[in-house]
Image (cartoon, rainbow, N blue to C red):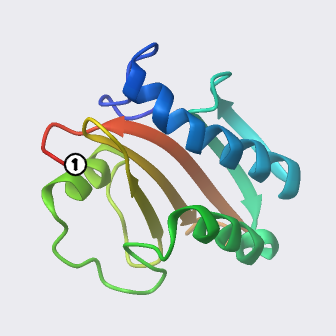
């Protein structure tokens, strides 16, 4: 799956600001967590990978260190999200009960997100997506 349509354009000053946060996170995740990388942007602003459920807790801890607590945790029903978060959720294809979503707001309507999606078809695998999007409503 490609990054959301609202994925930030390259070269903007605000995008560079969020990449300063995203790139070290993406690099750390790739160094620390064994994963099959499906797609990674050389700029460090997008990562899609598959990891083992055994590594989920380490991955969660790395994400929480950057984002703080998730806006939607595993096993919790999604509350009514504020418009900027709803736009991110819609852009990544929604968020289900068994999934987890982290959000960090940047400048100029930029949002850094990380989504953890355990596979329904194979409980031993989890998809991780980290990216930056520009939302149409103020973040």
The residue sitting at 72% across, 77% down in the picture is 57
Residue 126 appears in which quarter of the rendering? bottom right
Q: Reply above or below: 89 against 98.
A: above
Report whether 34 appears left or right of 20.
Answer: right
On the image, the x and y values in percent for residue 23 come to 65, 38
Residue pushed farthest bottom?
76
The answer to whether 78 is drawn above or below residue 84 in the figure is below
Give coordinates of residue 20: x percent, y percent: 58, 37
Number of marks present in the image shown: 1
In the figure, residue 103 lies in which quadrant? bottom left
Closest to the observer, 8 or 125: 8
* Secondary structure found at label 1: helix
Q: Which residue is mark 1?
A: 87
The residue at 46%/64% (across/down) is: 102
Query: Which residue is at a point 44% across and 38% down the rendered structure image?
Result: 132
Asked if residue 1 can be seen in this view, the reply is no
In the displayed structure, would residue 101 be above or below residue 1? below
- Image coordinates for residue 58, horizontal then vertical, percent: 77, 72
124 on left or right of 85: right
Q: Nearer the viewer, residue 28 or 86?
A: 28
Label 1 Cα neighbours within 10 Å, binned few <14 / some 14-19 / many ≥20: some
The answer to whether residue 45 is visible is yes
Residue 50 on image: x %, y % = 71, 52
């Amino acid at each position: 799956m490609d990054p959301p349509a609202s994925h930030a354009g390259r070269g903007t000053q605000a995008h560079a600001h969020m990449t300063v946060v995203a790139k070290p996170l993406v690099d750390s995740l790739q160094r620390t967590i064994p994963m099959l990388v499906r797609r990674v942007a050389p700029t460090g602003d997008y990562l899609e990978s598959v990891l083992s459920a055994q590594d989920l807790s380490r991955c969660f801890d790395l994400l929480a260190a950057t984002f703080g607590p998730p806006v939607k945790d595993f096993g919790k029903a999604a509350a009514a999200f504020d418009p900027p978060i709803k736009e991110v959720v819609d852009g990544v294809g929604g968020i289900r009960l068994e999934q987890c979503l982290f959000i960090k707001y940047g400048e100029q309507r930029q949002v850094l997100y990380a989504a953890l999606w355990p596979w329904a078809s194979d409980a031993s695998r989890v998809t991780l997506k980290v990216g930056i999007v520009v939302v149409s409503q103020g973040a």
